[in-house]
Amino acid sequence: MLELLPPAAILLVGALVIAVVPRRVGGALMLALPVLAFAQLLALEPGTSLSASFYGFEVEPLAVDRLSLAFGYVFCIAAFIAGLYGLQVMGTDERVAATMYAGSALGVVLAGDLLSLFVFWEIKAIGSTFLVWARRTEEAGRAGKRYLYMQLAGGKLLLAGILWHIAATGSIEFTAMDPGPAAVLMLLGFLMAAAVPPLHPWLPDAYPQATIAGTVFLSAYTTKASVYALARGFAGYEILVWLGVAMALYGVVYAVLENDIRRLLGYHIISQVGYMVAAVGIGTEMALNGATAHAFAHILYKGLLLMGAGAVLYAVGESLGTRLGGLARKMKAVLTLYMVGAVSISGFPLFSGFVSKELTMEAASLDERALVVILLKIASVGTFLHTGLKLPYMVWFGRDRGLQPRPVPPSMYAAMGAAAVINFAIGVQPWLLYDLLPFPVPYTPYYAEKLVEMSQVLLFTGLGFLLLLKKLAAEPTVSLDTDWFYRDAPFRIAGTVKRLRPERQPGRAGPGVLERFPPLQRAPLAGAKSPVYPTWLLGASILGVSVLILALALIP
Amino acid sequence: MTRTRLLIITAVLAVIGVGLDLAMGADPPGYAVTVGLVGCIGIILISKWIGKAWLQRPDPDAVPEDPPVPVPEREGDGDA
């Protein structure tokens, strides 16, 4: 029976244990649990499943195939590395949330049916929200609240689609979905969690507000679990190709404008997930391999980039480009490790991004999609421009602002080092990654023409950067995004209505929009608390209710 | 390095790149040079234009010590 133990259960039960054990033991568990889950995954053969009867449905909380294994492996690696990164800075509540989040994401990719997937999906939303709130700042409180609303909205779309699907087919099996209303609802739920514009603003809003280690966890799971779900249920949907291309370019445009280094990297998550979504839309075996490989590599190099940015934030307490600069000589090791992530994401030969991104490009090329290839290649140029050139210039090589960084904990260096080694290992030995992919890979990324092409693209991107260096100077601005529609528009509408409406008779007219919906009100001054401010009592209450609802749902 | 020199170096390297493509039979020659250079410049200019026209707003949390980061003037700037 033990051989059928779901790896997700190891992390989810472990999260509860972390909540009650001393902090030092909790830290050790943060590292041990992903290792145990990884070992359990290694013991599971494709085709293994665990099923049970639930209200007349045959649910499969564990169903293993090569696609789920590939995502499962990297989810465990990410949990270990992010846990190591946060070993000396994470509090107990943060560890509980992070482990619960990682476990539920693992549950999503190992779920064999739609009901199991939905339960894990919702736990994932709750765990990740607490990771945002764990920073305990006013901004994080508000961003976490908006994040929760968006995740729950996506979850409800998913649930509506699942129920519709069950009503129409009587099946809860999670397999390739036929187009129809149920598929559209489910697709919208997955697209929202994949941060596909215009459903994406929760990502650049919430991720930079999370704790330093929390952002590393967040970058690994939500969007990639969605890519997995899209690959399993919606491969070959043509609309995904163009949504993916739009994502890849959208993130790049916003990254040019961004001043906050963690938000800049957040926009680049959107851009990189675009490659995966486009590959899923292409839908061939090579493309699905590309989506999986890129998700795998992306978790590793994006984690490394966010760890580097987080180390800067930890050391100097700043993440705005306008307040950073001149740290190259003071944070050499962080710079070096960050640059490994930067060259990986930029697709430099010998690093992971090259072997994963080129798989997607090759799939698009073989499918005779020249425009898709060109647009994704241009997005790739933007990736190098921002993560490999603009951000390092802003943070490490810009004007020295006299910042005196405090020492970065050794565990952070160890985690970044581990991620850097894996990125390099995959780059020089692509089979390490290719052997994990769902289908055989008849492709080698290293041949002369490809190397020359990539080298030229990178070289001329660097020259373009130097030519327009002045235009890339950091500016103290924020950029409007589609969250304007729910963050600003209500106030503008309310303001307009108020101006147009005649003077109210005291005692006769009802309260205005803002008065009736306090959560919509913005705190007018710094220091004012958010309507849902993260407190221990609130967190414990929500967690308690969540556990109760889950327990009730599981009792037949 | 002056911008003029940078432009000259870019032009020389572009010629070498296209020549290399021709020698290796790349189709079309100059594809990578164009994607890299034009793509990079296009991304910066278009993004900045969109940003200035519609998207960028002053950061409400900015403090007076947050001016735009000045890029050191380079000798010969404006030569191009």
Image (spheres, rainbow, N blue to C red):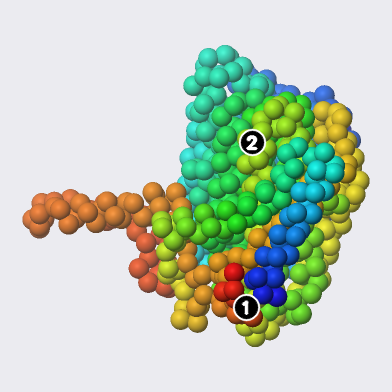
Determine the residue positioned at 22% across, 54% down: A496
Could you say which is closer to the camera, residue A181 or residue A242?
A: A242
Circle 2: element type: helix
x, y percent for residue A224: 67, 42
Give left or right: position of B55 versus A471.
left
Q: Chain of mark 1?
A: B
Determine the residue positioned at 70% across, 75% down: B1
Q: Chain of mark 2?
A: A
Q: Is residue A534 visible?
A: no
Q: Which residue is mark 2?
A: A372
Looking at the rendered structure, which numbered label has been put on residue A211?
none
Looking at the rendered structure, which numbered label has been put on residue B76?
1
Quarter the N terminus of chain A occupies: top right
Q: Is residue B41 visible?
A: yes
Determine the residue positioned at 66% across, 54% down: B37
x, y percent for residue A377: 68, 44
Task: Tell me the kind of residue under disc 1.
Answer: Gly
Determine the residue positioned at 47% across, 47% down: A149
| Spatial separation of the CA atoms under disc 1 and disc 2 | 40 Å
Locate residue A132: give its quadrant: bottom right
Indicate whether A248 appears above or below A277. below
Asked whether the residues under marks 1 and 2 belong to the same chain, the reply is no
Could you say which is closer to the camera, residue A16 or residue A380?
A: A380
